[in-house]
Amino acid sequence: MATLVIGASGQVGYEFYRQNKQKDDWHYTYRSVKIDDFIQLDAADAQRTDEVFSEIKPDTVIMPAAMAWVDKCEREPELARKNNVEALQNVLDSMKKNGGKRIVFFSTDYIFDGENGPYSEDAPTNPLNVYGKIKLKCEKMLGESGFDYIILRTTGVFGWEKQRKNFLYRIFDNLGQNKPMVVPDDQYATPTYVKDLVSAAMALLEGCHYGVFNVVGPEFMNRVELATRFAKGFGFDAALISGKPTSEFPAAAPRPLRAGFRIDKIKSLGIRMRTVDEAVKDMIARKAEDDRY
C-alpha cells in the first residue's frame, strides 16, 4: 500500500521524508523547488494530479502542500482558492478514481477569531481572513468526502527547514548579525516543533485515529517570549528583541491575537509534544548529525 506526500519540499512535507525515507512504498512530490528524486506535481493542475495518482495509486495521501502566505491570500483570494480548495478537490477526485482510502490534511488556528484561545477541537470557528476561511472550507470538504481523514490543526511550526521560511530563521538572520528585532507582543499561540508534529501524525495514522486533532506544542506564549526562547537556546543576545502591537505592523490580513490550541485529545492517546526549550535542544543535536542544515 503506497503513501504519497504532496508538498514534500516544504518544512512539514520534508520532515515526513526524513522520518520515512527508508520505506520503499512512500513517494514524495514537489511543486517548484526540486529535491532529490521527488516527483513534480502542482496539485492545482487536475490533469497532472491524475497522472501521478494513476501511476502510484496511493492508499494514503498526506497533504501539507498549500498556499499559506496569509497576506498574499488576502490580496489574491482567487489564487489562494486555486492553490488550496481546488488543489484539494483535485486530490480527492484522483483518490476516488485510483482507490485512495485515507488522507491527512493540515489546518490552522486562523479558522478562529482569536478571542478565546487556545481552542479545543469542538470550539466554534470564526475566521477573520481569507486564509482562515479557505482552510475551513477545506476541512468541510474533507468531512463530506467519504474518505477516512485526519485533520491536523497546528500553528507556529518551527524546526530546521531547507527553504528557511519559518519564524526561527528570522532569529538567525537578525540576531546572528546583532541586529535588533521587533516582533508582535500581542499575538499568542502554541508553537509547534515540526519533528513532533510529524511524529504525532504518524502515530495517528498507525493507530487509525481519524477525525480532527489539535497537534501543537504544550505552551501558550506570545511572539516576544518565543523569540526570546529561541535566542537564549541558540546563544544569541535576547536583549535585541523587543515587541509592539500587531496594529503597528503593516499587513493585508487581520490576525487572530489569542489563538493556538489545547491538546487534551492527543494527550489522551499518549502523544507527547515537546516544549520550545526541549525542541531547541533536539534541533541542536539533530544539526550535529546532519550538516545539510
Image: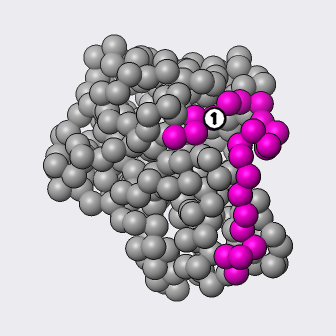
Residue 22: image location, x then y, percent: 36, 65
Q: Which residues are magenta?
A: 237-258
Q: For the N terminus, which image quadrant?
A: top left
Q: Residue at x 46, y 67 (%)?
A: 276
Q: Quadrant of the C terminus?
A: bottom right
Colour pattern of the rendering: one colour
Q: Secondary structure at mark 1?
A: loop
Left or right: 36, with 75 as reference point = left
What is the number of callouts on the image?
Answer: 1
197 or 130: nearer the viewer: 130
Q: Residue furthest top?
A: 144
Residue on which disc 1 sits: 255
- Compared across the picture, whether 202 is left or right of 139 comes to left
Residue 16 lies, in percent from the top left, at: 43, 55
The image shows residue 40 at horizontal and vertical percentages of 61, 42
Q: Nearer the viewer, residue 117 or 23?
A: 117
Report the residue at 57% width, 34% height from top. 256
At horizontal 40% and vertical 17% (from top left) the residue drawn is 140
Q: Is residue 251 visible?
A: yes
Horizontal side of 251 relative to 193 (left or right) equals right
Left or right: 154 as drawn, with respect to 214: right
Placement of 206 over or under 234, stated as above or below: above
256 drawn magenta: yes
**Residue under the point 45% across and 60% down:** 193
1 above or below 82?
below
Task: Tell me where residue 254 sits by quadrant.
Answer: top right
Q: Tell me where residue 189 appears, x and y as whole percent.
A: 50, 48
In the depicted view, which residue is nearer to us: 205 or 168?
168
Q: Reply yes or no: does residue 58 show up in magenta.
A: no
